[in-house]
Each structure stands twice: as C-alpha cells, then as structure tokens.
Amino acid sequence: MSASCEQESCEQGITLAGDLHARPAGALAVAAGRFASAVSVTAGGQTADAKSVLGVMGLGATSGQHVTVSAAGPDAQEAVAALIVILGEATKVGGLPRDQAGRPPQPGPSPGDRGNLTCHGHPSSLGRIIFIPNGPCCVLRGPVSP
Amino acid sequence: MTAQPMSTGTVGIVLVSHSAELAAGAAHLAAQVSGGTVTIIAAGGTDDGDLGTSAAKVARGLSEAESGAGVVVLPDLGSAVLTVRAVLEDHGDAESVLLADAPFVEGAVAATVTAAAGGDIKAVAAAAEEARHVRKL
C-alpha cells in the first residue's frame, strides 16, 4: 500500500497481521513521540493520537483490520513510514521480540549506527533510511521532499 | 528494587505502592510496553515487607531513578502521597521531581512510554495525568 504524501502531510494504511496489543501500541507510541509532527492512528472509525499509548490501545484494533496512520508536520513522511513499519512488524504473530527487561534484542552482526540509535536489518541503497531506535530499518522509497 | 537499567538523559519513574508486588508488577508491565529503555524504580511496601509505604524506599528510588532529566513519581493510594510529600520536603531539588496525580497502572505505562520517546519531565508527568481521561472501553 503506497503512501499519500504532500510536503508536510502524509497518510498510509496497513492491514494488521495481529492485534494491536499493549506492546505494539507502546512501540508505536514511543516511535511516534520522537517525531515533531502530529501523528494519529485511525481504526474502525476511531482516531487516536499515536503518541498516546493508552489512546492507541483504546482503539482496540484487531488482526485483519485496516489501520491508517496520518501525520502533519515537518517530518510527516518519515513518521508515517516509520509507524507503518512498526505496525507491520509489531502485530505479527509473536510480535516484537523482547528480553526480560522488555528491550528489543541487541543489534545484529552488522547494524548501522547513528549516534545512540541502532538500525537493524538491511539498509537499502534505493531509498532514504529512517532510523528507529533499536528497531528495524525503514527504507522510504519513492519521491522524498527536500 | 531496580527494574530497569539506567539510560542517561531519560526521565526516570518511581512507582510508590502499598504493595511491593503491585509496584514491581506495574514496573514490569510499563517496561515491557515501553521497550525497556527507561529507569523505573518500584518502591512498594514497608521496610519489613508489609503492606504500606516506606520513606526510605521512596528516597532511595528517587536517587536511583535520577539520571539528569528528572524523576516523575506515581503514588497508588492516599498515604503513599503523604509519604512521597514528606520525602520531597527533605529533597533538595524540588524541580527535578514531579508527583503525578494519575491512575497507577495507566499512568505508569503512559509516563514510561513518553519518557522512552524522549519527553521532558513535564511531558512525562502530563502523560501520566492525562491517563485519567482516556477511556479503556
């Protein structure tokens, strides 16, 4: 599903592979909180502030449901791309792997680092890489506004 | 009890409950939901392990949770508030600690997620207090 983006607003949908439980909602809200843009999640006719973990959990979004992420602000495209990746990963069966402390697994053999942010996976040269702290790489394909 | 590792620059959370198990459980839940990057200290029960609150545990929690960005404290019920206030009166730097008036579990989760996202002490306390207005049904 492709994103519908303009200069400072962006929207993209995804069909959930699993229920939007507490941990995926937390991962979503933590990531959303790092962007300057206002970000919202809509499911089943209800919209929540993506930065509010309780609001996202309150959507009660379940497996197979279509969810839309919208953002408005200077980093709207990056925010939507990052959150769509998280929604895709975190609601898979098994969800985000965690250790006892609740942390995602440690970086793999060849992570890309940017300051204290670690990027897992396989950065592609085809697009712009978005770093999600201790999360998967998000590669934004297609036109990127300056 | 220390639930989480230190993370410099992130607001710390202290959960003050009459029950050690309740504080530890809420800390565990909040850590799991937020990704485990925030220091959450469970300060529950009395010094000898009974139901109640301990000024010594709260004071120790404040110091363990502080990593330079301040600490938000969530009390569970009435006298936990009194204990925290008594400790804060003796605490030198009042601006670095905020007492949040919030539902305990929801507030702990919301505050920790906001801290994990890099929110400052006021944003973290506000997230906890806004938890009061979020419907779960």
Image (spheres, coloured by chain):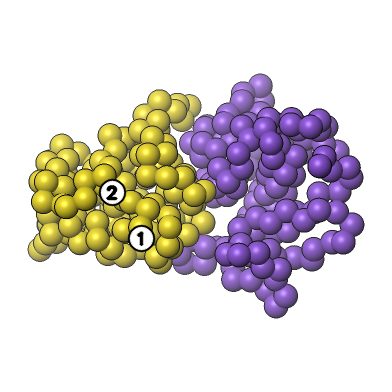
Which chain's residue wears label 1? B
- The residue positioned 61% from the left and 25% from the top of the image is A47
Pick the quarter of the image with the N terminus of chain B. Answer: bottom left
Find residue B96 and name its label: 2
Find residue B67 and name its label: 1
Q: Nearer the viewer, residue B36 or A100?
A: B36
**Amino acid at the residue labelled 1:** Ser
Considering only order in the chain, which callout, 2 or 1, is on the residue closer to the N terminus?
1
- Please tell me the colour of chain B: yellow
> Which residue reaches farthest top?
A45
Quarter of image, res B61: bottom left
Find residue A79 and name its label: none
Q: CA distance from mark 1 to mark 2?
A: 10 Å
- The residue positioned 65% from the left and 64% from the top of the image is A114
**Amino acid at the residue labelled 2:** Ser
Image coordinates for residue A58, horizontal then vertical, percent: 52, 32
Is residue A65 visible from the viewing direction of this image?
Answer: no
- The residue positioned 70% from the left and 71% from the top of the image is A111
Quarter of image, res A44: top right
Image coordinates for residue B108, horizontal then vertical, percent: 37, 45
Q: Secondary structure at mark 2?
A: helix
Question: In screen coordinates, is A16 left or right of B23?
Answer: right
Image coordinates for residue A6, horizontal then vertical, percent: 81, 30
Question: In screen coordinates, is A144 left or right of A18?
Answer: right
Number of residues whose C-alpha sits closer than 10 Å to that of mark 2, classed few (under 14), some (14–19) or many (20 or more): some
- Please tell me the colour of chain A: purple
Give the number of marks: 2
